[in-house]
Image: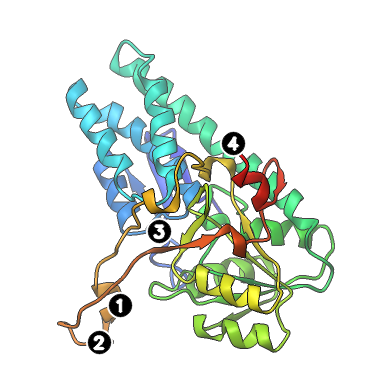
Amino acid sequence: MMRTIAWDDERELVALIDQTLLPAEYRIVTCAKADTLIEAIQSLKVRGAPALGAAGAFGVVLACMNAPDDRSLRQMVNKLRAARPTAVNLAYGVDRAFQAALKGASRSERVAYALAEARQIAEEDVVVNRQIGEHGSALLEDGDVVLTHCNAGRLACVEWGTALGVVRTAVAQGKRIEVLACETRPLNQGSRLTAWELLQDGIPVTLITDSMSAAVMRQGIVDKVIVGADRVVRDGVFNKIGTYMHAVVAKAHAIPFYVAAPCSSFDLKRLSEEVRIEERAPEELIYCGTNQLAPRDVRVYNPAFDFTPFELIEAVITERGVIRPAELTER
């Protein structure tokens, strides 16, 4: 199985797993232009903060290849940065690759510099995820049942995963770990992606509805909660909508709530109130595929993310180690 997103040297384009088709179909799609990659980002063919960092960087390569002039290039770079506003990794990847591209005096040099940086970002993600797994696995005990939300596995990264990378590493060390995967409405990244990933790896997983998390915690079934992050700010964490609910319930039941995230997801210059939460189309709630679930003219509120304050978080697991919230708020 290929990486979630990669550069195809032979065809000089971006290849990625179309996550909108999983679990029914595993298909690789390609993007030869930055606009096509932006559509893939916005339609969630590629998603997950670390994967978006790589996508943004590879998008700069495509922009350098196809932009007719400097003004067009900068416009496309800005369009890439804004494709999804909440996850900080997208802008991080775009900015790194674009700054590298500016070292070039010609189009071919800019492409070469941007591509070298994009590849570096992708390789760093693989290493960083493994390090997160190593640090986080020490927090898991043999026999633990871990609840997770959305998908913070290899599909959300270039490879391995953050929250699921912690589970994968613990399992590789011989620990018996089971996962409770919340479905993660409205687009079901938990049921479609997390459950699929874990079954592929032979890791025991049980799918539950989002509204079951309080019940299973009250029943004593859950030992730990581990989620990913789209942005870590000075006062807490932004992650897929529903995360805050799980954190509140975990706190009420004295269950450790962990966030697994690379340092590239940190944005400690900002507070939560300064971050714009992406709102998605009403159709995501009104329809499930082609099946209509609600009246077409109903008012819909569909934020993609929510905010969880640090007082509900036990620790953030990074490639540099396990960081307690007090250490972050002191910085």
- Residue on which the image places disc 3: 18
Mark 3 vs mark 4: which is more N-terminal?
A: 3
Residue contact between numbered discs 1 and 4, judged by CB atoms under 8 Å: no
Mark 2: secondary structure: loop
- Residue on which the image places disc 2: 294
Q: Amino acid at mark 3?
A: Asp
Mark 2 vs mark 1: which is more N-terminal?
A: 1
Q: Which mark is residue 124?
A: 4
Residue at the location (70% across, 62% down)? 167
What separation in Å lies between label 4 and label 2 (alpha carbons)?
Answer: 43 Å
Residue contact between numbered discs 3 and 4, judged by CB atoms under 8 Å: no
Callout 1 environment at 10 Å: few (<14), some (14 to 19), or many (20+)?
A: some
Residue at the location (46% across, 64% down)? 240
Report the front residue among 289 and 272. Answer: 272
Location of residue 176 in the rendering, given as x and y in whole percent from the top left corner? 81, 70
**Residue 142's quadrant in the figure?**
bottom right
Query: Mark 3 against mark 4, which lies toward the viewer?
Result: 4
Name the residue furthest front: 330
Answer left or right for 36 relative to 137.
left
Q: Amino acid at mark 1?
A: Leu
Location of residue 84 in the rendering, given as x and y in whole percent from the top left corner? 33, 51
